Amino acid sequence: MVARLGADRGCPYCAWRRRHSRVWKNQWWCSLILTACRRFQSRRRYAMAEKEANNSPMDSSTICKATHSHSQHGVFHPGAHSHHTWCPRAYNMSGPTNNAIFLYNGPPSRNSESTKSHVRPYWSSVSITNLSEERLLSPSCGKPGAKERVPRKDVYLVLIELACLAGGLLTVFYSRLAIFLGQINQLIVIGFLLAVMSLCLEGQVLRTALIHTASRTGSTIQDLDALLRKDPFASKVHFAYRLLPLCLLGLPLLLSVGYKRFTGGQSMIQLKNGGDGFFGFSSTPGKQRIGDGLSILSDVYVPFWIDPGLNRTYGFNMYVAPDNKTAAIVDSPFPAYLKSLQSTLLNGETLTMSAMVNATVSEMVNPTEAERNSADYWTAVEEDFDHDFALNGGDVRGANNALWAGMSGNFLTNFSVMYFSSWNSTRNESFTSEAIRTEQTRRMAQATWLITPSNITLTETAIIANSVQGNQSLLQNNAIGLQELFSTFLGEYDWHNRASAFDFPYPAPDDGQLRYFQPVNTVPALAAAMAWARITILDTIDRPQGIQSPQLRAQTGYNKAAQDIVIFKYVPTLRRQALLIAILLLNPLISLTCLLVKGLFLYESPIGDQFNTISLLAAAAGSDLSAMKGASLSGELSREVKVAFNVEGRNTLLVGQAAAERGIVQIVLALDQPGQRHGKIRTGVIYC
């Protein structure tokens, strides 16, 4: 008959075993007899139990729920209770109940005549050699526990993501670290941090989705399976749970592409140990050995001549003031100093260097109309210069030009004042009517250069007002011979006769208007470039000592202390933009959202943060799993199977618990029961 398992004192087999345990103990020949008896008795009783189960229906009153004294927490021990046999009809999970059913073959009473026929020694129990036949259960090793409102694992993961966020922000927005890493290493670091954050986020989102399935009506076992396997292509899965793994797969890919679009930025740091610098009359590296200055004159002047403008810098040392009458050639760093700076730069890195230096300034100061028309004025100029102007052009088609500068005796020239003139006699023009007067001085200027590994460019210049130097001997008492050597350049860079003789315009300015004539005065820049080129070639200390005066050579170069030179280094880094911050913030924000949702809205869900395959199998123990029959290999079901997690109370206490600690309840899986809602858990309750 079917009955609940009794206590040990009601079991005649256990009592018989206690009485004869000393007799049978340690008898080796008993094992052979016991083995044979167990096999025979187990097969016989199993066949009888199956026949009886098929002939007599069972109701819920016969369900075995009590725990035998020889089995802990309902675990069946064959050695102690071989007379408790699994009922195959109850075990096939086809009935309305989800609980295990046992058959009891013990004696009906002590006074019954059939007592002896039912009382058997313990060695006649069911054999344990074939577990699939005997339906034996292993001891329980599940660990009950209470659900945490804020899981520790999630807290640790959020902290890791916040640390990665801080590291990413420092990598991009802290200049010293950004410069130390450089753009390539920045990309590597940001990619690594995003990968770590994505790994942390993936588990949090999936666990949150799993917990949500146990709080949503209509969840299916396919939803749980797809989330546990992270399979967006599983069949019979809710759209949201199918989309979630795809998003978790695509989000890291999008972020990895997104942050790489922020290349092209720069980070700046000031260099305070650049050392002393040497400045003066110097051409760019490699051009110190060129002739008499004709080449380096064109080198600095042609960029301006092609596209003249006001308040602009050209090349590495020319500046044109906004007043359209002043230009300057600033003293530049000498090649040795420049190369020492360039040697510290890698590809893409640049320096900006600012210093107060000397400059050769040319300013247009034209004679008045009265002076221009006065013969006495020009006679005084000729007497002062001690010679007449040199005529060029040969009056071909009326074109002529002339450069006129003074002499200071002993073949020394004074180019502090020069006259430039270009005229056409066919238009009733003359030297005096078209003459342009320029004054050259040595002044102070604040200059800034942009230095790359292979180039130097003047970017900003400001001429210091009232900064004319007391010693002007480089311009006023120097044998540089500008008039004879450079007068032919007046035709080369004709600003008067041929300025509008072409049918194509000058380079278009920013406003887009085409210019066929040049409103910018080009003469002051030409005068300053002539004086600079001739002094650089003849007097600079970059060239060997010749007939030049040592005093003049000393004025062409000078040392500046490191504290007087301001150098900033620019290193290619990622661009500092708000969108990059958003990319770094996305993972931590989603992670914090999951943490808040689980703690505030999903805490009562019967699934915990540690839910896994073991949890699912533990909840399914004793449940009706017939809906999934046939899917052991394919893993697929032909229809959606609803799932619900019920919370059932128990009175059993764990070892060491007092009576006041009652409250252990069990989470049970229910399959294919439409309309059944999920249970809810409570704070401080232990669940198993």
Image (spheres, rainbow, N blue to C red):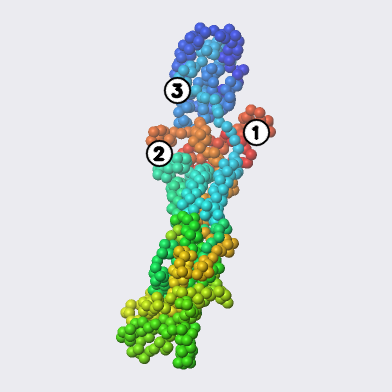
Eyeballing the image, is 485 above or below 619?
below
The disc labelled 3 sits on which kind of residue? Answer: Ser
- Residue 411, position as x, y percentages in the image: 45, 77
The disc labelled 2 sits on which kind of residue? Answer: Leu
Q: Are marks 1 and 2 in contact (CB under 8 Å)?
A: no
Q: Dot 3, how many residues are within 10 Å of its Cα: few (below 14), some (14-19), or many (20+)?
A: few
Question: Any mark on residue 321, and which?
Answer: none
Q: Are marks 2 and 3 in contact (CB under 8 Å)?
A: no
Kind of element beneath mark 3:
helix
Which numbered disc flags the more N-terminal residue, 2 or 3?
A: 3
Along the line of sight, the residue nearer the viewer: 632 or 231: 231
Residue 650 makes an appearance in the image: yes
* Residue at image point 41% right, 33% down: 632
Which numbered disc flags the more N-terminal residue, 1 or 3?
A: 3
- Residue 376, position as x, y percentages in the image: 47, 92
Q: In the displayed structure, does residue 269 sit left or right of residue 292?
A: right
* Residue that mark 3 sits on: 132
Q: Residue furthest left?
A: 397
Q: Dot 1, how many residues are within 10 Å of its Cα: few (below 14), some (14-19), or many (20+)?
A: some
* Residue that mark 1 sits on: 662
Kind of element beneath mark 2:
loop
* Residue that mark 2 sits on: 637
Which numbered disc flags the more N-terminal residue, 1 or 2?
A: 2
* Residue at image point 51% right, 43% down: 203
Eyeballing the image, is 128 above or below 286?
above
Residue 258 makes an appearance in the image: no
